[in-house]
Image (cartoon, rainbow, N blue to C red):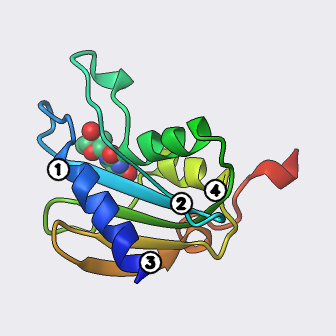
Amino acid sequence: MTTDKLIRAAQTAMQNAYAPYSRFSVGAAVQTDKGNIYSGCNVENAAYPIGQCAEASAISAMISAGERTISAVAVAGIGQALCTPCGGCRQRIREFAAEDTPILVCDESSLRHETTIGDLLPLSFGPDNL
Ligand code: THU
């Protein structure tokens, strides 16, 4: 099942997170309209503010491969609280996704919650505004 594959890609990327400062590992995977999956993890830095979120890494991989349209996203994070995309990453996803695009919120082993980018970022400002 494609959803399972997407979730597994996010969980696998999470294992490679570079998060020595927060110790909070995150993985993300985006599926495109062409059916391909691109994943990434958070990459922290000793200069804290330039650390990169997992979603940004996954989107960067997608753009680098020449793709532009996200059809689903999975985010996998550790801990009890749901690891939903941060505010900045909601906007990053919105750039390449329609409002009804599913966001699968996962932990190391399972899907915890399913929502959409429109629910996470209502009344968003996006490419159509410009
Ligand atoms: N983080 C992500 O990778 N994605 C999010 O949407 C939330 C936060 C990362 C950034 C930082 O490396 C760590 O989680 C703690 O904030």
In the picture, the quarter occupied by the C terminus is top right
- Alpha-carbon neighbours of circle 1 within 10 Å: few (<14), some, or many (≥20)? some
Nearest to the observer: residue 74 or residue 126: 74
Tell me which numbered mark, 3 or 2, is placed earlier along the sequence.
3
The image quadrant in which ligand 1 is located: top left
Quarter where residue 105 is shown: bottom left
Q: Residue beneath label 1, please? A: 15
* Label 3: few (<14), some (14–19) or many (≥20) C-alpha neighbours in 10 Å: few
Residue sitting farthest toward the bottom: 1
Q: Earlier in the sequence, mark 2 or mark 4?
A: 2
Vertical position of residue 86 compared to residue 122: above or below? above
The residue that label 4 is drawn on is 94
Name the amino acid type tagged 3: Thr
Residue at 23% in and 51% down: 14
Q: CA distance from mark 3 to mark 2?
A: 10 Å
Q: Nearer the viewer, mark 1 or mark 2?
A: 2
Distance CA(mark 2)–CA(mark 4): 18 Å
Q: Residue at x 64, y 67 (%)?
A: 122
